[in-house]
Image (spheres, rainbow, N blue to C red):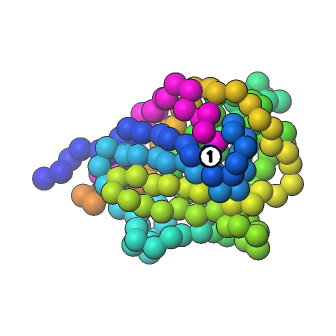
Amino acid sequence: IDTTAPTAVGFATTNGGGTPRTLEANDNFTLTYSEAVAPTSIIPGWNGVTVQNVVVRADDNAGAGGNDTLTVYDAANAALLPLGTIDLGLSTYVGGDRTFGLPGAAILSTITMSGSSLTIKLGTANLGTTTSTGSANVQWTPATGVTDTALNNTSTAPYSVTHSNGDF
């Protein structure tokens, strides 16, 4: 009987947009768990094989003295998916909150699954600005709600990576 909760074990970025250290369409980030998770615990009805549209919000937290963060919502931008929050380690990524891949955008944000990893690809951004910034330490704090196939809820212990966001 599996009684072990999945944990966060990896975070990586890929620059698909062309400008290093800038959040833009076609950039990717990958969240990796210690074991495969149930796709239906992330998006109801998802089989984990198909590409799903999502919306990614980049929140400018500089005014509150915090780092910019990323969160992932469903395709309608109505429900927060239980993937947690990615703290980008700096407050200079966005000047004002930005949303990537809203319905009707030229490029939609997507999520794909491969084994124990989820890759989120940024779509076209709405209003706001992005800036090139330096490398920083990223921290992914998973949320409760994602389960493995034995229905063990994900641990919310943070996963930190040194200088991992330089590839955006």
Which quadrant of the structure image shows residue 68? top right
Q: Amino acid at mark 1?
A: Asn
Foreground residue, 88 or 63?
88
Q: Is residue 19 above or below residue 17?
A: above
Say which residue label 1 marks: 15
The magenta span reads: 152-168
Seen at 57% across and 46% down, the residue is 14
Q: Was residue 50 drawn as part of the magenta stretch in this picture?
A: no
Tell me where residue 100 appears, x and y as whole percent.
72, 57
Tell me where residue 165 appears, x and y as whole percent.
60, 35
Tell me where residue 141 appears, x and y as whole percent.
50, 37
Q: Is residue 164 above or below residue 155?
A: above
Q: Was residue 160 drawn as part of the magenta stretch in this picture?
A: yes
Mark 1, Cα crowd under 10 Å, few <14 / some 14-19 / many 20+, is: many
Relative horizontal placement of residue 126, taking residue 167 as reference (left or right): right
Q: Secondary structure at mark 1?
A: loop
Relative horizontal placement of residue 106, taking residue 149 as reference (left or right): right
Residue 14 seen: yes
Q: Is residue 159 above or below residue 53?
A: above
Query: Which quarter of the rendering shows the C terminus?
Result: top right
Q: Does the magenta stretch mainly form a helix, a strand or a loop? A: loop
Seen at 42% across and 61% down, the residue is 113
Q: Is residue 38 above or below residue 163?
A: below
Seen at 63% across and 68% down, the residue is 75
Seen at 74% across and 31% down, the residue is 133
Furthest residue toward front: 18
Residue 60 seen: no
Foreground residue, 101 or 142?
101
Which quadrant of the structure image shows residue 63? top right
Tell me where residue 28 appears, x and y as whole percent.
58, 51
